[in-house]
């Protein structure tokens, strides 16, 4: 698509940024729009929520788009796509609509009763607004990192957008905010999206496993905690990779800590009407935050405008609303039900391994009979954990559907590279893009 400028001279002055920063933001915003499968969610009728949602209980199926045009997406060959709207539940218990994708394999696995096993995929951070919902993106967010791999292995993948992403308005036109890092709310999205998908497509198994990474890793861990107090039949366990556990326990000097906390501000603005983001954001950060809210762009634009400055005031952690949010949404030191596999790269600078380790140890100390397995990978960073650990999580998921037992008590395992660490590709240096030219597609 042609490059467009979105940021006016007045906005540049009000945000206190330079034209160079604005140009970087616009480049990121142009790229983000190129990843949309169907234009903005505001112009895609699928995301229009039907009036029946106004009285629907969480888990209710609201709408089915059984066969969207897969040519608009960058899916692996011999996979198919559906999309659904369903009712979910926010952190404070309010019923709201949400969206999800359903990715189908060509030759699905089968359970003994003939049903198709389901994996609920919990994605990492994609943004805060409707256009950042994975069901709206050509690559469904994270592509071969998990959803494509699962489908190619014969599982039906139900990928919740999380409330506020994708479908982000009620039938009455009210905004559905994305409660970023509200782990219990994201766990609700996962359970209810599976329930709605099962209602939409009867061949799906009643049994399911949850797999999540980063923000989604926190959602998967929260799902295990939710299962301990709100049992859902058919739940077989969860895998939490690079999981968000406790925001306050992440190193404050980490490269994305300020960004994560600033993104949480969006949830706080809706959850606590008395909250004022100026109480925790620096003056410079507040000016830039206001511009970001005007654009309603994805995390790439957010990184362009928010990285490189002091975002948080020195006493930000004393803010009562932020403290209450962290208390209600943190993982660890809480009972879990069903087996939980936690995966962590020891070179991860986004989710520090020490934070994950503390959460695991606190859970195991408080609940020593928890079926919790903790596995770490030496030299592996944030996103690459899904590739380094792929054999492990695929086998673990297969074992759950096969009914293999998991013993009680916590277990730990450390993985080291077969070759010297410096010989391995550290992070992804490629993306999946749309291409139709046969001479390019024929290239090895």
Image: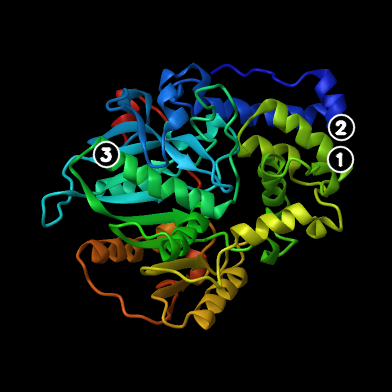
Residue 299 on image: x %, y %: 62, 39
Q: Secondary structure at mark 1?
A: helix
Q: Quadrant of residue 263?
A: top right
Left or right, residue 44 beside residue 286: left
353 sits to left or right of 86: right
| Above or below, 24 relative to 319 | above
Q: Nearer the viewer, residue 95 or 401?
A: 95
Q: Nearer the viewer, residue 392 or 24?
A: 392
Q: Residue at x 41, y 74 (%)?
A: 373
Q: Residue at x 60, y 38 (%)?
A: 128
Question: How much space separates mark 3 and mark 1, taking CA atoms?
Answer: 48 Å
Task: Assess disc 1: are there few (<14), some (14-19) or many (≥20) residues with their C-alpha within 10 Å of its C-alpha.
Answer: some
Q: Residue 199 got which mark?
A: 3
Residue 359, position in %: x, y? 57, 72
Sequence-earlier tag: 3 or 1: 3
User: Which residue sits furthest front?
Assistant: 55
- Total numbered labels: 3
| Disc 2 target residue | 16
Which corner quadrant of the image does residue 5 belong to? top right
Mark 3, residues whose alpha carbon is within 10 Å: few (<14), some, or many (≥20)?
some
Identify the element where label 3 is drawn: helix
Query: Which-is-in-front pick, marks 3 and 2?
Result: 3
Sequence-earlier tag: 3 or 2: 2
Quadrant into which the C terminus falls:
top left
Identify the residue at image location x=42%, y=77%: 370
Give the mark nearer the N terminus: 2 vs 1: 2
């Amino acid at each position: 698509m042609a490059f467009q400028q979105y940021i006016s001279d007045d906005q540049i002055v009000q945000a206190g940024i330079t034209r160079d920063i604005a140009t970087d933001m616009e480049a990121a915003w142009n790229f983000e729009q190129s990843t949309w499968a169907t234009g903005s969610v505001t112009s895609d009728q699928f995301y229009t929520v039907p009036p029946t949602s106004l009285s629907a209980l969480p888990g209710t199926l609201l709408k089915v788009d059984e066969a969207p045009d897969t040519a608009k997406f960058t899916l692996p060959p011999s996979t198919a796509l559906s999309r659904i709207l369903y009712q979910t539940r926010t952190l404070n218990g309010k019923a709201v609509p949400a969206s999800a994708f359903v990715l189908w394999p060509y030759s699905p696995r089968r359970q003994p009763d003939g049903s198709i096993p389901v994996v609920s995929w919990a994605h990492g951070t994609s943004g805060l607004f409707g256009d950042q919902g994975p069901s709206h993106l050509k690559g469904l967010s994270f592509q071969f990192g998990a959803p494509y791999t699962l489908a190619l292995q014969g599982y039906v993948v139900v990928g919740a957008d999380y409330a506020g992403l994708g479908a982000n308005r009620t039938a009455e036109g009210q905004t559905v905010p994305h409660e970023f890092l509200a782990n219990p709310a994201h766990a609700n999205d996962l359970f209810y999206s599976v329930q709605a998908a099962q209602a939409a497509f009867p061949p799906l198994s009643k049994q399911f496993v949850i797999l999540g990474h980063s923000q989604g890793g926190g959602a998967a861990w929260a799902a295990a905690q939710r299962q301990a107090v709100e049992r859902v039949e058919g739940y077989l366990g969860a895998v939490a990779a690079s999981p968000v556990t406790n925001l306050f326990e992440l190193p404050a000097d980490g490269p994305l800590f300020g960004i994560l906390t600033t993104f949480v501000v969006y949830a706080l603005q809706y959850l606590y009407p008395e909250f004022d983001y100026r109480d925790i954001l620096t003056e410079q950060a507040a000016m830039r935050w206001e511009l970001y809210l005007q654009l309603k762009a994805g995390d790439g634009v957010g990184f362009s405008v928010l990285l490189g400055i002091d975002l948080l005031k020195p006493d930000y952690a004393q803010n009562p609303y932020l403290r209450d949010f962290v208390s209600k949404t943190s993982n660890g030191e809480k009972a879990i039900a069903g087996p939980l596999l936690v995966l962590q790269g020891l070179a991860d600078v986004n989710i520090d391994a020490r934070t994950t380790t503390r959460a695991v140890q606190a859970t195991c100390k408080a609940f020593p009979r928890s079926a919790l397995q903790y596995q770490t990978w030496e030299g592996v960073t944030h996103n690459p954990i899904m590739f380094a650990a792929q054999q492990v999580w695929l086998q673990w998921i297969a074992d759950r559907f096969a009914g293999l037992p998991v013993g009680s008590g916590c277990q730990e395992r450390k993985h080291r590279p077969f070759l010297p660490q410096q010989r391995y590709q550290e992070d992804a240096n490629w993306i999946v893009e749309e291409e139709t030219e046969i001479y390019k597609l024929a290239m090895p």
